[in-house]
Image (cartoon, helix red, strand yellow):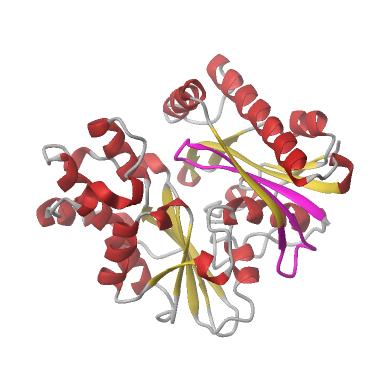
Amino acid sequence: MLAIGLMSGTSLDGIDAALIETDGEGVARPVAFRGEAYSDAARSELAEATRIALTYDRPQMSRPMIAATELVTRTHALAVGTLLRDAGVAAEEVGVVGLHGQTVAHRPDRGWTWQLGDGAALAAATGITTVADFRSADVAAGGQGAPLLPVYHAALVAGLERPLAVLNLGGVGNITFVGADGALVAFDTGPANGLIDSWVEEVTGARYDAGGALAAGGRVDESVLTAMLDNPFFDAAPPKSLDRSDFTIQPARGLGAADGAATLTAFTAETVALALLQLPERPRRLLVVGGGRHNMTMLAMIAERCGLAAEPGDSLGWNGDGVEAEGFAYMAVRTLKNLPISFPGTTGVPVPMTGGVIHRA
């Protein structure tokens, strides 16, 4: 089946759209991929919606949240149309769209998680059956609702020597451990690009540290790093998950631009090292996907502090920018087939669970 996955991460940089062919069980065959950047105005509107959402005790559709939902839905529909045009594929040939939506708050401790995006409206706009709201059923059952990509990571690494781990470096980092017997353990590691992006934007006006160049010219402040690592999240046993807002750049304020970037990058690397200690056994390989793999300084720090090479998944022929979007296409097909997408070892749910809400075109 041809399936489209749509992912808009907490970095608020834009939409990743991937077209794959998959049965939701074996490895998917990538067909096309496209990244659509948010405009500055859209990014500002979504940042404000995130700020507002984090003040609520539970999701509620106030006027700004309704407007942001319409923005997300409209831009995702345009991304689908552009992807299909570029691929030369008609909408009628696609079996399903997997809409992750834009996370504005992730609060499993309060029993909810919130991703903006109207699955029914997207199905109507594209003419393609759409699966949305992948995380809520997991959280309602007592799970963390994240990470969800492990089921796709496991399909990607089928046939590789195990145990190994897949590290996704998005706004928040998460790791998937695949044991020799195929057992899955996964959890959020800590901020990945999120704090670095926030720091760089505040001190330089750029959106991110391109290639890690700013951090490469700085010195890690070990006292600030130690203070940031003194957080109960890192001692908590997995499964566990984070909202991007759970950590801030406040401890780094007072440092120079380069030193702050270096310190925050080292913080990400140290959180990965701590995560490896919580895996059932040490992986033989650490395969890296997500935007953070473009940051050479970060990859070098991870390798140094983990004692394990950080290998971009692209070396295996993967599209490291498209893995998350591909994963939601894969999970959408699994939802149509009533197959589980989350597991006790990945989100903490009591039993393997299906997820997602189906909206027929």
Q: Nearer the viewer, residue 233 or 81?
A: 81
Residue displayed at 25% across by 33% down: 204
The magenta segment is: 2-30
Please indicate, yes or no, whether residue 343 appears anywhere in the rendered image: no
Q: Is residue 193 left or right of residue 204?
A: right
Up the image or down, 249 lies above or below 189; here it is above
Residue displayed at 61% across by 24% down: 71
- 8 drawn magenta: yes
Instruction: Tell which residue pokes out farthest to the top in this image.
Output: 63
Residue displayed at 51% across by 26% down: 39
Q: Is residue 39 left or right of residue 127?
A: left
Q: Nearer the viewer, residue 107 or 161?
A: 161
Residue 83 in the image, given as x and y percentages of width and height:
71, 41
Up the image or down, 333 lies above or below 312; here it is above
Quarter of the view holding residue 182: bottom right
Residue 258 in the image, given as x and y percentages of width and height:
18, 45
Question: In which quadrant is the C terminus drawn?
Answer: top right
Instruction: Tell which residue pokes out farthest to the right in this image.
Output: 92
Residue 211 in the image, given as x and y percentages of width and height:
34, 51
Question: In which quadrant is the N terminus drawn?
Answer: bottom right
Image label count? 0
